Image: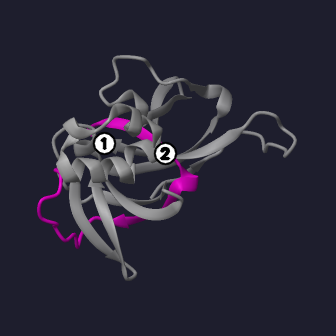
Amino acid sequence: MGALVKSGAVQSMDNAEEQQQYLTFLLGGEMFSIGILNIKEIIEYGSLTAVPMMPDFIRGVINLRGAVVPVIDLAARFGRNQSSITRRSCIVIIEVEAKGDRHDVGMVVDSVSEVLEILASEIEPPPNFGAKIRADFIAGMGKVNGKFVIILNVDRVLSIEEMAIISNGGIQNIDPERALAT
């Protein structure tokens, strides 16, 4: 789906400059990224089973090799309208941790772009204001070719505990201290 972009010279193991790879994707015309170590696979959008009485951002569940995997509409999770599904839409399967256990969660994105290598020195802290999504959802702002790419904090965006609280009673019932501690 995307090409690996090399950063020039091959880096040696003793290089102090930490370099990480990120999958970039589009969502509502904006470029986002997540660390590839969290990604299990990318699949074509389809075969979702709707689950009654779930929040708008939970599109449904899929059967992934016998396992039930919830699928989150990332745009709706950010408080926007649900994503419009196109032929380029896909589901990125992410492994998240909740209470010591690992769980697979799918997230719907408009399209997957490429895998980029971003040096740690090219990542700025998240902005304190002005972002169109919650500040705790942003891990950093990566500089790529003179532009910023929003690096998402996957454990926050796909927090199993927070989504369960929202499903059971609405966001108004979330204790902010507890939500930030997850």
Q: Under tag 1, what secondary structure?
A: strand
Q: Nearer the viewer, mark 2 or mark 1?
A: 2
Instruction: Choose between 35 and 167: the one closer to the eye.
Output: 167
Point out residue 74 in the picture as x, y percentages from the top left corner.
29, 47
Q: Under tag 2, what secondary structure?
A: strand
Q: Is residue 21 above or below residue 46?
A: above
Point out residue 100 in the picture as x, y percentages from the top left corner.
54, 59
Name which residue lies at 39% across and 49% down: 159
Instruction: Say which residue label 2 marks.
Output: 34
- Residue 3 circle label: none
Which numbered disc, 2 or 1, marks the residue that appears first in the sequence?
Answer: 1
The part of the chain drawn in magenta is 28-56
Name which residue lies at 34% across and 46% down: 162
- In this rendering, would 16 be left or right of 62? right
Q: Is there a contact, CB below 8 Å, between mark 2 and mark 1?
A: no
Q: Is residue 26 above or below residue 37?
A: above
Point out residue 52 in the picture as x, y percentages from the top left corner.
12, 64
Q: Residue furthest left?
A: 52
Q: Residue furthest bottom?
A: 66
Residue 109 appears in the rendering: no
Quadrant where the N terminus lies? bottom left
Q: Quadrant of residue 53?
A: bottom left
Instruction: Say which residue label 1 marks.
Output: 27
